[in-house]
Amino acid sequence: SQKIEQNSEALNIQEGKTATLTCNYTNYSPAYLQWYRQDPGRGPVFLLLIRENEKEKRKERLKVTFDTTLKQSLFHITASQPADSATYLCALVQGSGYALNFGKGTSLLVTP
Amino acid sequence: GAVVSQHPSWVICKSGTSVKIECRSLDFQATTMFWYRQFPKQSLMLMATSNEGSKATYEQGVEKDKFLINHASLTLSTLTVTSAHPEDSSFYICSARKDGLFSNQPQHFGDGTRLSIL
């Protein structure tokens, strides 16, 4: 069966450091992968999309890598800030439609 | 742009009540919308795909007679939880994708509805 695995343990880092979150998947051959941010009691907010032919994608302090051989994506937040504290979700398209399968998410806590 | 509004944000009601949740795309058309459910500390789980003008497609294990979906216009989908019971208590989230774009586009999510059945 298709699986998306994210480190379910919370990641605690100090402000200013780089946070690195991991997403591994099995039984997918995705054309692209997406990352979302979810705050408590809110819906997910889209952050970045990376295509299978892209090794890396950047947006401001965010960087995503995509290794289709390892079946893994890494999500980096550089110069992290307390406002970056949230749950980050990795998502892949499910089946032949457009619906998304999500990982459980990794909770990030950035402390001053 | 790409705002999705979900209403209500919080519902508390008695067991046996039917509850309707609305999902609106405010500034774009969405032929396809999605309904997800999320339990505490769990991932979003797709319940159904809502298609404007046709029947919704339900995921395995989701009762279509329990969770009624109506997508009557290009900007509105509704989810009705019929005869709700405490086990239906959850966080329900809708999303929409813009029409006319390639498949590799993000989805835009509402802020969810917290449903609590007493």
Image (spheres, coloured by chain):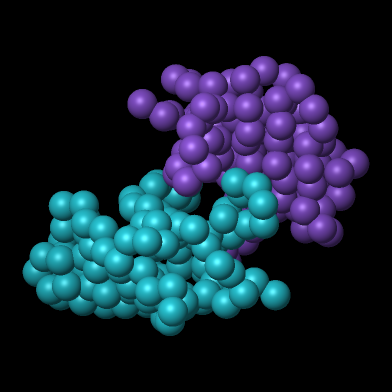
> At 21% from the left edge and 76% from the top edge, which residue is drawn?
A13
Residue A45 lies, in percent from the top left, at 40, 47
Residue A77 lies, in percent from the top left, at 21, 65
Q: Examine the rendered structure and indicate whether residue A101 appears above or below residue B54.
A: below
> At 82% from the left edge and 32% from the top edge, which residue is drawn?
B55
Q: Examine the rendered structure and indicate whether residue A100 appears above or below residue A107.
A: above
The answer to whether A39 appears left or right of A110 in the picture is: right
Marker count (numbered): 0
The answer to whether A19 appears left or right of B72 in the picture is: left
Quadrant placement of the C terminus of chain A = bottom left
> At 90% from the left edge and 41% from the top edge, which residue is drawn?
B65
Q: Quadrant of residue A72?
A: bottom left
Which chain did the renderer colour cyan? Answer: A
The answer to whether A18 appears left or right of B86 in the picture is: left
Q: Nearer the viewer, residue A29 or A87?
A: A29
Q: Nearer the viewer, residue B118 or A69?
A: A69
Which chain did the renderer colour purple? Answer: B
For the view shown, which residue lies furthest in the right direction? B65
For the view shown, which residue lies furthest in the front direction? A53
Residue A60 lies, in percent from the top left, at 16, 52
Q: Quadrant of residue A107?
A: bottom left
Residue B113 can be seen in this image = no
Q: Examine the rendered structure and indicate whether residue A39 appears above or below residue A55.
A: above
Residue A7 lies, in percent from the top left, at 43, 79
Residue A93 can be seen in this image = yes
Q: Nearer the viewer, residue B92 or A21?
A: A21
Quadrant placement of the N terminus of chain A = bottom right
